Amino acid sequence: MRAIPSDIKDKTFDVIIIGAGINGAGIARDAAMRGLKVLLLDKGDIASGTSSWSTRLIHGGLRYLEHGEIGLVRESLRERERLLHIAPHLVKPLPLLIPIYKQNRRGPFTIRAGMILYDLLSFDKSLSLHRMLSREEAVRLAPGLNREGLRGAALYRDAQVEYAERLVLENVLSAIEHGAQALTYARVDRFIVDDDSLRGIEFTDLIAKRVHTARAQIVVNASGPWVDDLLGRMKRYTPRLIGGTKGSHIIVEKFSGAPSNALYTEAAEDGRPFFIIPWNNLYLIGTTDIAYNDELDCIEASAHEIAYLLRETNRVIPSAALDRASILYTYSGIRPLPFVSDHDPPASITRRHFIHDHAPALKGFISIIGGKLTTYRNLSEQAVNLIFNKLKRRATKCRTAEEKLPGAKTENFAAFSEQFKVENNLHEPAASRLLRIYGTRAREVINLAYKDRELLSPFSRLTGAIGAEILFSFESELAVTLTDCLMRRTLVGLDAAAGLDAVEAAARIARKYLGWDETRAAHEASEYRNYIRRFQPLELRESY
């Protein structure tokens, strides 16, 4: 049961981290592993912001090469390799095909040069080198490709984090294992400032509707797109730090001509690269890149963005014939990029991260600007090194590049997976799903199910998720609401029906096994439906 510790006001933490997205979670994990006293807070759930709404790639940033960001590409490629090691259940190799057309801004020479440099910068990688393909080879690999003007293609490998939500969650769980405290639905309302030093925060427990204070020597603002919003509560001038851009995606079923490998192609309309990716037994198409200065808490894909993605997909794969009715749901997020000016085109803004120390104007305060799923671990290491420096303490060695995340704690994950399937006599799809989501912790889910065989039964027809996963999310994974459970624990909310096929069954299980009364079960189901409307799911559109 979630509860704010009654003595929290009497403690002094080494560091308070505001924001439980990938950056905040990574910093919390690294700091706790190095022995610091850590408090992590978020006004919503873990990974309920930008971290859940990316293109779900762990990539080296191939397109950053044309902007001359060699250092960022090298950092990304190095970190990709580390994530393949510490989270093999979540981060998997992904082949990508780049078709090359006569009308493209980037011709065969440019693409080949980029591929060669990409391979050179990833000299320590475990993934195979790129291949340049002829027109005929490209068509054999992706028969649905538009053949008009097709000159050839490049085939290379990056990586995919199918469930980015779980990557964030496992960093938080690891932080807690190492002594950190993590509080969700805890909204920071005020900063406690003494002269020119930040001493702590005042926050509201949005569940119990109570106000608390917490003190620390260092406070880290890792709230992503909300960085400036949080700074606005300082009651003193702070420069604008975030120049966010909006990225939207559409999710569709497998369609005519759908590629077996991910496509990384150039949009005819604006020359911007976009992806068509096999994902979660569906296809993910995106993304857009639009300057954004509006409301941050309920982002929706616009009609213009949806039309753009449909139009460009149908151009590259003419047999797709996708239209608005083909879209199962959409999702959108805001990239917390550094603010440069209101006039810079989004594509030109650097994807590098920055750690902004507010001293000397305000000591003990750091803000995180930018950052990507791929490079979060290195950003976290840099941030924790700075925290030690500000604490005037010698930094202990960072171990996050070697120590595996909770769901990967085994010498050989492939061997563990085979043993898990044999031991539990589960159908292949059910066993594979549990392993893809929970990794080695799938054994804990199954052990919970064996206490009551009813919990082995699926509550979601489309995904096969079992009842034990609901209990596990609330008892072992910090879920507070049914939305937390479906969207960011069991991932049922990402199925073809956006979880609407399973919400009533999930509420019934929570009522039976978690002690919810009828009123709460109905309220939680209703709140889930309200939450999911922003994604414009087909099932709700058809009921309008």
Image (tube, rainbow, N blue to C red):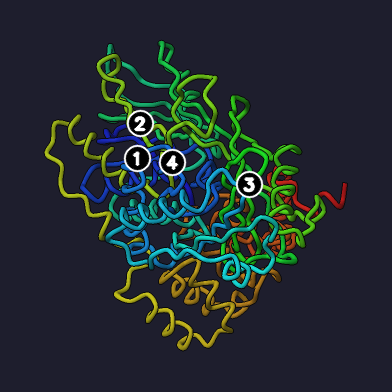
Identify the residue at image location x=36%, y=29%.
Answer: 367
Q: Which residue, given by chain and number where applicable, does mark 3 sit on? A: 103
Which label sits in the foreground, 3 or 1?
3
Looking at the picture, tell me which residue is in the foreground, 357 or 140.
140
Identify the residue at image location x=47%, y=23%.
Answer: 228
Q: Which residue, given by chain and number where applicable, does mark 2 sit on? A: 214
Whether residue 116 sits left or right of residue 507 in the image: it is left
Which label sits in the foreground, 1 or 4?
4
Mark 3 Cα-neighbour bin, 10 Å: few <14, some 14–19, many ≥20: few
- Residue 66's disc is 4
Which label sits in the foreground, 3 or 4?
3
- Residue 39's disc is 1
From mark 2 to mark 1, how far is it between C-alphas? 9 Å
First reached walking from the N terminus: tag 2 or tag 1? 1
From mark 3 to mark 4, how far is it between C-alphas? 18 Å
- Residue 331's disc is none
Whether residue 518 sits left or right of residue 265 in the image: it is right
First reached walking from the N terminus: tag 3 or tag 1? 1
- The amino acid type found where label 2 is placed reads Ala
Which label sits in the foreground, 2 or 1?
1
Give the image location of residue 395, x and y in percent.
15, 41
Looking at the picture, tell me which residue is in the foreground, 294 or 27.
294
Whether residue 524 sits left or right of residue 291 in the image: it is right
In this picture, is 124 found above or below 287? below
